[in-house]
């Protein structure tokens, strides 16, 4: 089999040089051709004008009759001979009168002359084995053609001048071409270097280095491409950080879930094995069954909280908003969590006017407030948890404030992360032990197009501020 030949590669620098030089060469060629043609026409036209001028002077002298025709002819012959111009005189029939000879004007020329128009031949014609420019002028008296005067000038001198001009143009083009190579090479080198920087940066990105940054510019498309490249790298870097964060959270998730599942499952398995093998005393069986029930409920809560979180993240939850009196909601929260608060010697207080209302999904609102209030109970002892509500700028504002241990400023943003635990002791608490509660809270508030802020200092308590539009 025949091997395919590799395609010939031409460096971009050489492509730029060839294109620049090619454009310059074509421009000079066109300019030279146009200029040479213009000069040639100009030279021929000047020659014709000169011949017409001499011919009219000869006719005027003959017409005035101050001197004899032979004297006029001899005088002009000497003058025109010095300028390499010859002239002839023909009668009205086209026969040659001066100088003597057998030449005769053709009928077409005589017809044109008879109309009083000069006959001009601007092209190169053969006359006495020489290329000349020819002008024939009529001699008319009383509307009658008396004769014709014919003047000729060789074009060899004109052609030599045009040829010399063309040579100057050629050498000028070569000089300009040579001088243009250096700036063209420098300009091409600048563009190639900018493209090389893009190429090197792209290669670094392909290897996983997202710290690349190119100097941006609005000067041209390459500068705009550099800006777009920087924007792309910034997004890739952000995406890489998010992926790394998600991977870390995934590992933490697996670790946390394994830990959370292992403890209740070990307890349940131990109790069941003890009951099965009769290793638990009769008076201890009820206690063992209650322990299995509690650990089972813990597992159910773990599964339910995970399902809720994933449903919220995948927008599978549909809210059924209704206009609710906020005081009624607070009283339900207080009633449900009073016993849990009492276990840590806490009190739940309510501060809200009767006319304060909220537009929200009732069940999800209860879920939000219970999660936050449970969190406050968890980190408060011998204190109080206050639920406040008010209307503000077409929003319902809810504040849940406690007098607990507070949260370190560096930890506030982390409390919304899935499975994040601000304190190790949370794993021993039966409420929100899986670190999912506040993650669900934030997602549910966003579904209501609301916002939540946390204000806290270590040892000074914590305040959650929720704002939900009331429209």
Image (cartoon, rainbow, N blue to C red):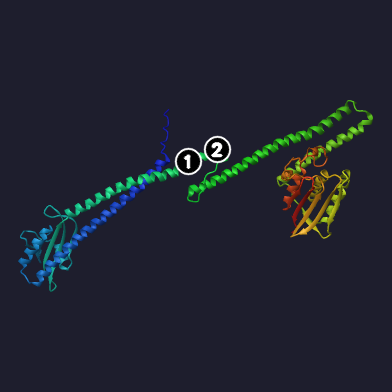
- The residue lying furthest to the bottom in this view is 142
Q: Which residue lies furthest to the right in this view?
A: 283
Residue closest to the eye, 68 or 226: 226
Left or right of residue 358, residue 145 in this image: left
Task: Give coordinates of residue 428: x percent, y percent.
Answer: 82, 37
Q: Can you see residue 19? A: no
Q: Point out the tag, 2 or 1, that comes first from the N-terminus.
A: 1
- Where 295 falls versus 470 (above or below)? above
- Tag in front: 2 or 1: 1
Q: Which mark is residue 434?
A: none
Q: Quadrant of the N terminus?
A: top left
Residue count near mark 1 (Cα–Cα under 10 Å), binned few <14, some 14–19, many ≥20: few
| Outermost residue toward the front in this view | 459
Is 37 above or below relative to 440? below
Q: Which mark is residue 196?
A: 1
Rendered location of residue 255, percent (x, y): 73, 34
- Asked if the residue under mark 1 is in contact with the one under mark 2, i.e. CB atoms within 8 Å, the reply is no
Q: Name the residue located 33 percent from the left edge and 49 percent from the top edge.
A: 26
Residue 206: mark: 2
The number of discs equals 2
Q: Is mark 1 on a helix, strand or loop?
A: helix
């Amino acid at each position: 089999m025949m091997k395919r030949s590799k395609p010939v590669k031409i460096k971009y620098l050489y492509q730029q040089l060839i294109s620049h030089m090619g454009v310059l060469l074509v421009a000079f060629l066109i300019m030279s051709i146009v200029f040479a043609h213009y000069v040639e026409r100009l030279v021929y036209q000047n020659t014709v004008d000169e011949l017409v001028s001499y011919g009219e002077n000869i006719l005027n002298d003959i017409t005035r009759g101050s001197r004899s025709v032979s004297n006029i002819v001899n005088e002009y012959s000497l003058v025109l001979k010095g300028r390499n111009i010859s002239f002839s005189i023909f009668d009205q029939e086209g026969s040659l009168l001066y100088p003597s000879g057998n030449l005769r004007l053709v009928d077409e020329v005589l017809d044109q002359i008879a109309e009083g128009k000069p006959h001009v031949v601007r092209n190169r014609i053969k006359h006495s084995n020489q290329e000349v420019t020819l002008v024939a002028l009529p001699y008319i008296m009383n509307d009658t053609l008396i004769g014709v005067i014919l003047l000729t000038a060789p074009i060899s001198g004109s052609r030599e001048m045009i040829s010399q001009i063309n040579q100057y143009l050629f050498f000028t083009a070569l000089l300009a071409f040579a001088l243009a190579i250096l700036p063209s090479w420098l300009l091409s080198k600048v563009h190639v270097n900018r493209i090389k920087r893009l190429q090197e940066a792209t290669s670094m990105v392909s290897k996983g280095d997202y710290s690349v940054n190119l100097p941006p510019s609005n000067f041209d498309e390459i500068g705009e491409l550099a800006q777009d490249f920087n924007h792309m790298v910034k997004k890739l870097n952000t995406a890489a950080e998010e992926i790394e964060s998600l991977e870390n959270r995934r590992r933490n998730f697996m670790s946390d879930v394994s830990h959370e599942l292992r403890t209740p499952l070990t307890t349940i398995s131990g109790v069941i094995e003890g009951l099965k093998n009769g290793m638990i005393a009769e008076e201890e069986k009820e206690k063992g069954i209650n322990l299995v029930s509690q650990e089972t409920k813990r597992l159910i809560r773990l599964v339910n909280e995970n399902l809720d979180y994933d449903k919220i993240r995948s927008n599978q939850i549909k809210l059924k908003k209704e206009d609710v009196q906020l005081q009624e909601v607070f009283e339900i929260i207080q009633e449900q969590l009073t016993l849990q608060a009492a276990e840590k010697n806490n009190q739940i207080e309510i501060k809200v006017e009767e006319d304060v209302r909220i537009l929200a999904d009732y069940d999800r609102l209860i879920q939000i407030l219970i999660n936050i209030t449970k969190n406050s109970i968890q980190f408060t002892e011998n204190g109080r948890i206050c639920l406040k509500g008010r209307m503000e700028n077409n929003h319902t504002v809810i504040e849940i404030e406690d007098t607990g241990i507070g949260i370190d400023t560096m930890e506030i943003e982390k409390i919304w992360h899935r499975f994040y635990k601000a304190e190790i002791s949370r794993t021993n608490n039966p409420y929100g032990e899986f670190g999912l509660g506040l993650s669900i809270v934030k997602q549910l508030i966003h579904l209501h197009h609301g916002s939540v802020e946390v204000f806290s200092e270590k040892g000074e308590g914590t305040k959650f501020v929720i704002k939900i539009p009331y429209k």
